Structure formats: C-alpha cells, structure tokens
Amino acid sequence: MMRVENVSPRTVLAAVALAISLCAAFAASAKGTLVYCSEGSPEGFQPQFFSTGTTFDAVSVPMFNRLVQFEIGTTNIVPALAESWTVAPDGKTYTFKLRKGVAFHSNANFKPTRDFNADDVLFSWYRMADDSHPFHKFTAGQTFAYFDDMGMKNIVGKVEKLDDYTVRFVLKRPEAPFLADMAMDFASILSKEYFDAMMKKGTPNAADVYPIGTGPFEFVSYQKDATIRYRAFDRYWNGRPKIDNLIYSITRDATARYAKLKTGECQVMAFPKPADLDAMRKDRDLVVQRKEGLNVGYIAFNVEKKPFDSKLVRQALNYATNKEAILKAVYEGNGQVAKNPIPPILWGYNDAVQDYAYDPAKAKALLAQAGYANGFEIDLWYLPVTRPYNPDGKRMAELIQADWAKVGVRANLVTYEWAEYRKRSKTGEQAVMMFGWSGDNGDPDNFFVPLLGCEAVKGGGNVSRWCNKPFEDLIIKAAQTPQQADRAKLYEQAQVIVHDEAPWIPIAHSVRFDALRKEVHGYRMDATAHHYFDKVDLAP
Amino acid sequence: MLRFVLRRLALIVPTFLGVTLLAFALIHLIPGDPVENVSGERGMDPARRARLMHEFGLDRPLAVQYASYVGQVLRGDLGSSLTTHESVAHEFATLFPATVELATFALLFALAVGLPAGVIAAVKRNTPADYAVMGVSLTGYSMPIFWWALLLILFFSVHLGWTPVSGRIAVQYDVPALTGFMLLDTLLAGDAAAFRSALSHLVLPTIALGTIPLAVIARMTRSAMLEVLREDFVRAARAKGLPRWRVIVVHALRNALIPVVTVVGLQVGLLLSGAILTETIFSWPGVGNWLIHGVQSRDYPVVQGGILLIAAIVIVVNLVVDMLYGVINPRIRHG
C-alpha cells in the first residue's frame, strides 16, 4: 500500500486525472439503496450486551432473528427461527421445533459450513446464563443487560437439545410472559460455529465486533458515528429483502434529519420533532406514519410517605388533575388520556374502568375527609428530559401545579439531572413524581410487575412503592396462567384495584411518528418502536 | 531558542496535571454516573450494577480514582470507553482526522477572507467598506454556531439545494479510510466524484466553524494594520514612491502579522471547541461529536482522554506559533 507521507504532488495529479476519467462509471450505483437517518451510533454490534433502542435498530433488527418474533405492527407472537412450539400443561416446559434451512451470513473471516440448529440456541443462551461458559466474558464492563435486569436466571432452569431441530426450555416456575421475552432483542440467536472459529483463530472478540446472524441484512461496514452499511442477505429464510442495500446515516440532530429527508439524502427518518409534524404532513413528498405507543406517562404517589399513605388524598388528586388539558397542551393532541397503567392497544386492557373525572369540588371534599381541608405543601418531581411517553415534563408539571393549587395543594416543582432523578427515585426519597414506561414486549406483565409489583419496590422500579397483596396475587397468578384469555381476565381485575387504590395518576399514552419519503413502500411502524426495513421497497 | 523551547516544555508538566485534574473534576461534578446512565426506566439488576461499578473502578474513593488515572496516563494508557469498550486512544485516532480536516478548512477560510477584509477595512478606514467589514464581522462573531449552522442548512441545502445537509460524504461512496482525511482518501481511491462529494460536504461546516475566527482575524488585522500604517517607515516607503500595494502588503502587512499570528494560534483552541457544536449539527464524525456524546453518557475515560489530547494539541500549536514569531519578524529573538 502506498504510504501517505510519500505521495508526491505528481502522484496526486495523476490520481486526480485518473479519477476524473473514471468518475462517470460510478454514477448510478445506488439503485435499490434505502438510506435511514438514524438518531445515534450503536454501542456495539452485539445483540446481547446492550439495552438501547438505537443499538437494537442497528443490530438485532436488521441482522439477527429470535426463536419467535412480534408480527410487525402488533405484539402478536409469531414463529421465526422456531417453526412451532408447545407448552406443557404445567406451564414450565417449552419445546421449540426449529426451522430447517436457515442460513447464517458470512464474512471475510468466516464461511458457515452448516445451517442454524439447536447448538446455536444452546450456545446463545448459555453464553448469557452460564458464568463459566468460555464465551461468557471477555472484557471489563461487558454484561448481558436485559438478561440480567429481567432476572432471566430466576425464570429459566435449563435448556436442552432433544435433537438437532428440537430444544426444550425448562422453567423454574410457570411464567406465561416467557414467550414474549424470547421475542426480545437480547434473545437473538448467534452462530456457535462462528464463535468457535474465531476462538480457534485467537480472536474471539471479533465475533462480537463483526456480526454474523440469520437476519435479512448482512453487515458490510461501519464508519464510526457516520454510516452503517448492510446488504440484502440472498439466502434469508423469510424471503430476500426487496432493497439491495440498507444504509444508516447517523444524524443526531432532529432538524438535520428532517432537512436530509426533504432533500432526499435519506428516505426514512427516526424520531421527527413533534413541532415539525405539521409541516411534514403538508409536504407532498413526505408521508408521516403514526402508531399508538406501547407506553404510559404517569404521576406516582409515594404511598410510604404522608400524606400519600392516605387513599383519599391520592384519589382526591386524581380528581383534581385535568388530564384533557394536559393532553392538549403537552402532547399537542398526539396521544390519549390514560385511565389504566397499560395502554389500550395491549390485550387485557380494562375499558370498563371509569376514569376519575376532572372535579375540583369532589377533590376538595375528599381532601377534607382525609383531614387536609386546608390542603398541604408538597414537592412534585418532574422529568428533566423529553421521553417517548412525555414530550415536556416541565410544562406538564406547571399545569398540574395550577390544577392542584385550586384544591389547596401547593406543589413545589423539583427536578434533577436525568440519571440522578432515576437514582434518587429508587431510594424512595420522592413524595410524588412524574415518570413513565415504554413496553419491551407487549405483555401486560411487562407493565404490572416492573412498575407496581412488590418485588419492584425493592428494585426501585416501583416508584410509588405501592405493594398491595390482592393486586400482587392477581399479577403473579396471571403470570403463571398459560391461556391468554384467562390471563386477560386476571389483569382486568388487577386494573380495578389499581384504579381504586390510586397509587398513580395515569396521565397519557403517547403516539409515535416516523417520517418517510413517498417513494418508500411497504414500511410499517412496529409496536415496540423498532425500525424494520426487510419488507420495504423503493418505487418512484 | 533552545532554552526557550525547553522552558516551554517544562511548563507542560504542570499544565498536564492541571488539565487532567480539571477534566476529572468537571466530569465527576456532573450528577449521574455511567452505569446509572444506561439503566433507563427499568432500573438495573443490583448485582449487575455492583459488578459494573467495580469493573469500571468507580467503587473506589475519587482521590484513588484520580491517582490511578494519572498513573495510567503516564504509562501511555488512556483507558477504554465505558460505552463501546474500545480504547480511547484508538477512537480518538479514528475520529481526529475528520476534525483536523474541518478545522483546517475553517482556518483557511477564516484567513483567506479575514486577512484581506481586515486590510481593506484598515486601508479604507471610515468608509462604507470599513463599516461593512466591521459590521459583518461583529454579526458573525455574535452568532451562535448552532443557529448559524441551521440557517446555512435551511438556506443552502434545503431551499437552494446547492449543498448537502450533513455528513462527510454522500452515502453511496464507501471510500476505504486509509488516512482518515476524506479528501485524501477519495484521491487515493481515485474517485473524483467522491472527492467532489467530500468537498461539497465541507462547504457549510467550514463556513459555520470558520465564521467566528474570521471575524476575530478581520478585526485584529484591521487594528494592527491601522497601527502600522501610522509608522514612520510606512511613510518613508510611500515617500520613496513605492507602489501602493507594495507598501501595504510588504511593509505594513508583514509587520502587522505578529498580533494576527498570535490570534490565529489561539483560534486553534477555539476551532476545536467550536467543532463540538459544528460537528453535532452537521453529523460530522469527529472528536467534537464524540466528546459531546461522551459527556451525555458520562463516559469518563472518553471525556478525560479527549480533553487531555485536545489540550496537548493546543499546547503544541501555541508553542509552534511562539516560535513562528522569530520567523516572521527576526527582531524578536528567543533565548
């Protein structure tokens, strides 16, 4: 290779001359290329280590598959690398029949000699689960984020290979949400053969840096903080993608993403700014898609602290809060009022629950009944950042402050830096705080247990620190009940308890948006906020 | 000269300690920590949290963390990013050429426009040309970079369609990064279309980043020129009957350059800090963009290492600038 220091001016001139003569040949090579303006750089190219949506969008979504997957646009679980599965009557044994003829990608250092089979499933699982697994850990700071944080070790006892195309997961306890867990990014299937080959070469780390999966797109290259390139995988089991190349153009600034969409430098953009939506809708070259969010924004009362140990006070402030006004002013109409902890697009949603209507007089009466006729003074913590479930925490807090003032409750608005905010909330320092949640897997369990379960009081995710025996019994029973219809009934009852006990003021479920150019066809927004491009086509 | 250089080099030791301490203190003053930062609403398994804190060495007292960091740096190890687990030095080396390319163009742009503008303003003192130059440079100096950058994008890229919005090169060109300097790499790859694309991507970031240094240089040149133009030797040169341009360029400008060169040296620091905002708006994959993200994710080694390396570069550049005085004006002797 030519060393740069040695390039003489004459060489450069020659190169320019050569280049100019060649340039015509490069002109139209971008056919079938979709450019997606993404919002940030992935933390790495490994689906098990990380927990951000940005990384999942760049890694597990285009390049990997799970045993099961969510049907795009819904939270229905459909077959993926497992063709079918059975659940034993005890609810603890899941047997997956694996798909045959599923090919892995290849790269310069690795050509697979065999298709996907049960060994890959066991490898992918035990790499996370078994501390003494040879691939469990290479570098300091590398952990299996979701696997650890969701406590998978306490759920799954062992995974067995029955034959090359049959695996059995034996759980420690019946756990109906398990199937939804298996559709999550961290449960992506890696190639055992690839890792073994890299270990043999003495570069085991390479397998985590240059990804090999079974997904619709193969990894081509990554230019740090600039571009990620993929190409369609010809042997993709679920049909080769219609586009030939997929490029993520990393553009952190939302205004710049919008500008690039307008000029055609990208065809799809992530996370448009709500303020730009109107202009986008008016633009004849663009299409704005919307999707009900799998989320909830709420106010949590710390029930361990006075005066919120009183149910009457909690109900009173539910009556005192004008949610419709918040929805208009804060969400600009892009959402719906929440009356339950789970959004209505989730199965098990109890629509029969009657929300607390905005009624300051009733709120005052309840406060008087609780012994607070003259109201009280309280610190209300508000979100310091924009979150998918809450576009403007401060504005929301100001509205709530004004609402509560009308019933004699004087709220001081308090906030902290975002990480600090979460850290403090786990210690129970707060009296009443604003928070929210975006669902991972479309199972109601994924809202109730981490947000309102008794275990989550200890872990800190239950910021209202509300632990209610009848409610807890219901959600535990629901998790152990195999049939979805039966589970739905239990969750419906649980929502009635949450409503009556009022540990929260559920405020809103927000709507998400993606913006694309009109030449993009077949793009569908995903329920769990991922961005899928394998069914997308480009046509003028 | 040698003694001067040695004295300046000796100063580097306390400067280095000061920079590490400052960077360390500043990033630790920001609330939150890198482990908490990745946990989100879900919260983190306490065992995983404890393990990470331990592996990152964050469970030790701050003084111990600082001492071990300085020791590590002295051994030439800047540590690894807590987010990507890549070595900080390697990440910096990958991204720095992009920043150098942008800063160089911005500086060249600032000099190419700022110097003549300042000379014209001085020579045509108190004429509309002078007022125009000074007015425009004051506006440029006061304009926040991110705002100016967005205006440029909206006008030139979106409205007129003359320039690309952001990035270093159009996505269809996948040029192997031999040097990391996109213009050089496209030439080495022999791809003229890619070269043109890279050049067009440089235009707006160069203007956005170069505007403030341009304003500073123009004003500095003007005032230095005004002073020199009053000197006796300039009058003498005129009296000799030399052509006007020769008096201005050879006699006056050369002598006015000393303060200007000092200012240009100081601009290097300004360019690198301005690059942080410019790179963020223009998705320019350089160290500025990288540092901002490091601060956001509380990636201590990235922020500390990045600041240290940038400080080192600024120190070296200023040293070189000081030595350049002698070259420009032989009357200044070091020693």
Image (cartoon, rainbow, N blue to C red):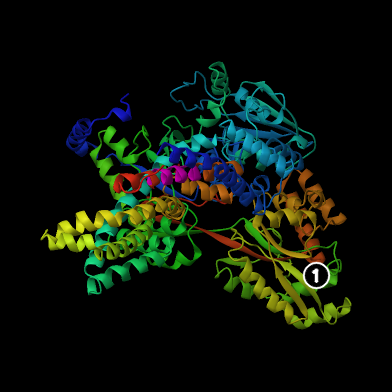
- Residue B110, percent from left and from top: 32, 55
Q: Is residue A534 left or right of residue A519?
A: right
Label 1 sits on residue: A314
Range drawn in magenta: B310-321
Asked if residue A510 is positioned above or below residue A223 in the image, the reply reads: below
Horizontally, residue B231 falls left or right of residue A482, namely: left
* Residue lying farthest to the top in this orientation: A200
Q: What x and y, as percent, mark residue B156?
A: 30, 60
Q: Main secondary structure of the magenta part?
A: helix
Q: Residue at x 57, y 50 (%)?
A: B295
Whether residue B297 can be seen here: yes
Question: Based on the displayed image, in which of its 4 quarters is residue A302 positioned?
Answer: bottom right
Residue at point 86%, 78% (across, down): A372
Please, which chain is the residue tagged with disc 1 on?
Answer: A
Q: What x and y, as percent, mark residue A301? A: 78, 65
Residue closer to the observer: A117 or B226: B226
